[in-house]
Image (tube, rainbow, N blue to C red):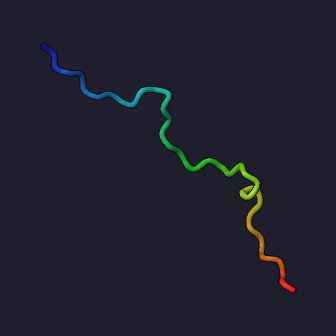
């Protein structure tokens, strides 16, 4: 009798982990600028 089928590729729908998603939180919108001058 035929043996067990070999493991196929991952099922569709599971996309591979891509690069980190862009920041959506406010702290990530603007790049950190220079610190304000002190007194």
Q: Is residue 10 left or right of residue 13?
A: left
Percent of width and height locating residue 18 = 53, 45
Percent of width and height locating residue 30 = 77, 60
Relative to 27, does residue 9 appear above or below in the rendering? above
> In the picture, residue 10 is in which quadrant?
top left
Q: Residue at x 25, y 26 (%)?
A: 6
Q: Residue at x 84, y 82 (%)?
A: 37
Q: Residue at x 46, y 26 (%)?
A: 12
Q: Return the residue found at the far top.
A: 1
Percent of width and height locating residue 25 = 72, 51
> In the picture, residue 34 is in which quadrant?
bottom right
Q: Is residue 3 left or right of residue 17?
A: left
Quadrant the N terminus occupies: top left
Q: Return the residue found at the far left.
A: 1
Q: Return the residue found at the far bottom.
A: 39
Q: Is residue 22 left or right of residue 9?
A: right
Q: Residue at x 50, y 28 (%)?
A: 13
Q: Is residue 13 left or right of residue 6?
A: right
Quadrant the C terminus occupies: bottom right
- The count of marks equals 0
Given residues 37 and 13, the one toward you in this image is 37
């Amino acid at each position: 009798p035929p043996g067990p089928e070999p493991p196929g590729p991952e099922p569709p729908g599971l996309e591979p982990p891509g690069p980190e998603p862009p920041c959506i939180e406010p702290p990530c919108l603007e790049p950190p600028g220079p610190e304000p001058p002190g007194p």
